Amino acid sequence: MSQAKSDPVTWCQSLNRWFNGTLTRKRIEQPESPAPAHVEYLEIRQLLSATNAVSAEQTAANNSSSDEQTANEAGSSSSTTTTHGVDANGNATTTTTVTTTMTDADGNTTTSSTSTTTVDSTDDTDSDSVNSDLAIASAVQTDGKIVLVGAAQMNTYGNYDFAVTRLNSDGTVDSTFGDNGKMTIAFDLGGADEDGNLNADLDIANCVAIQADGKIVVGGYAQRDSSGNYDFAVARLNPDGSLDTTFSSDGKALVAFDYGGSGDDRATGVEIQADGKIVLVGTCQQDASGAGDMAMARLLSDGSLDTSFTGDGRKFIELGDGGDDAGAAVAIQSDGSILVAGYTTGANGDNDFAVARVTPDGSLDYSFSDDGKKTIAFNIGGNATDRAASIVIQSDGSIVVAGSASGTNGDGDFAVARLTSKGGMDGTFSGDGRKTVALNLGADNEDGATGVAVQSDGTIIIGGYSQVSSSGDFDYSVARLTSEGDLDTLFAIEGKKTVPFNLGGSDYDMANGMSLQSDGKIVIVGAAIKADPADTDFGAVRLDSDGGLDTGFGSGGKKTIAFDLTTT
């Protein structure tokens, strides 16, 4: 194997990349012959088991060392107890009590206790258990509240459910939403790991959109079995976080393409049309080789498939010559046309950005790039792995697509392209319609954009992650471009900003999504890793429009949220 299964950092990196919508189909290893799509799924299970074993060994070693130290302290003994709670403002509190017993030369003993309580507004109700919870996408409501979606680990077998939380505008968890600010949604279709453990479903939320009536639409995928069979999955919540039973009778709906292979169909993007219809995009598997195509589905507001879209509500788009293609994000134009961004794979294995446009009835729009499809190559060197993750439409109709472009030795950069409304490269943007931004902070310099937005002045915000060191240290990162495609030096430092959580361990803080508030503030969400390398929380960062951390949000502009629901 190219990476050691017993390395907890490797597991966290693989898990986060695998969950990330833009890299859903990226292989952990590249076999010589085509492998089924579930190779990632099997590897994740193995890495999870190895990580739990390593964490147990580390804990035992630490406990042994602590006991030894206490025994060697002749004439005195002390004990420490730690309790967690929540204050009146919803912030997590940690109370540490140290009790010390001293014995003098005459055998007299005295006992004293000291208690210290700290308030940590970055971490709500975090327990001592090890859980892998991570945010993948966010959306901002009209009242300024922020909805984060992703996955929460439910048991030690590796069962994950959709996870949703809502924050007030100041970053505190909104206790009026769901169960004290949090909600998990299980599809439980019968998924299992390779050993047949039935309590190991992977139900992962990748995307979220807010309806005009305040209802929350969450999209992703749900696992059916251990062979790599997944379906598009979507849930709709009422504004209070409860499942909306007017949507598919129980608040949950599934879309199966089942065109071939193991049926690996995963949604990674969602948008709401002006008429209330719901558009999902992602990837569907076409054959046993594991190759996929861009996939789309449109639902009516009641959760049923919209048969006015392609006849049965579903569509796949083959972009290349039979290679692996994927959809990652969606945007809807004012005329109802639908844009999908992702990537396509060429005969040599290289990836290029890909954008397709369909008419409101689901037909390819041949007024866009002649055939309804556009590929964009950055080709900065090496393996030429260029993958789009996000798409946004400017007020003038121009189309901005962002993701990552990788070159030699895995060196990746933020990559942005701008197209005209007809699908041509926009030469007024960086000369040829393409721009790469390198943060180059360390090691392989693996930087990637996972979100893009346009501010009211036409400047372009790109959010994602940047590698800091070879030890697995990644930080959230943001860059801003002028409308002409140059780095905007008025933003942060020379147009770029990185934000670490640094909660311990490998500091593998991976940003997976970004949203823009109406006041221009920037919200970036993802995972924040803690001291135990298998323990991650939802992470959120908010920046002012000029790139500074917004100190009115969370603790110094940063917030973590723990679900911590793991049971055996």
Image: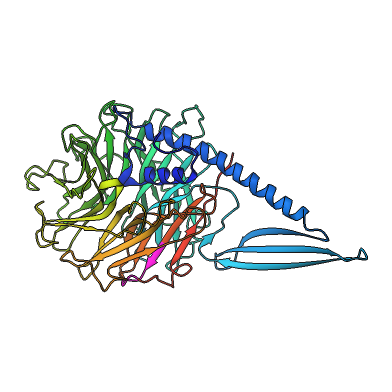
Residue 42 image offset from top left, x and y in percent: 42, 32
Residue 444 image offset from top left, x and y in percent: 34, 51
- 195 in the magenta segment: no
The mark total stands at: 0
Outermost residue, right side: 106
Hey, which quadrant is residue 33 in on the image? top left
Whether residue 405 is visible, yes or no, is: yes
* Viewport quadrant of the C terminus: top right
Q: Nearer the viewer, residue 183 or 134?
A: 134
Whether residue 301 is visible, yes or no, is: no
Write the residue at 17% across / 41% down.
Answer: 362
Q: Is residue 395 left or right of residue 555?
A: left
Write the residue at 13% across / 61% down.
Answer: 429
Residue 473 image offset from top left, x and y in percent: 43, 54
Q: How is the image coloured?
A: rainbow
- 546 in the magenta segment: yes
Q: Is residue 424 left or right of residue 507?
A: left
First to last magenta residue range: 541-547
Whether residue 116 is situated above or below residue 342 in the rendered picture:
below
* Viewport quadrant of the N terminus: top left
Whether residue 29 is situated above or below residue 8 in the rendered picture:
above
Q: Is residue 305 left or right of residue 72?
A: left
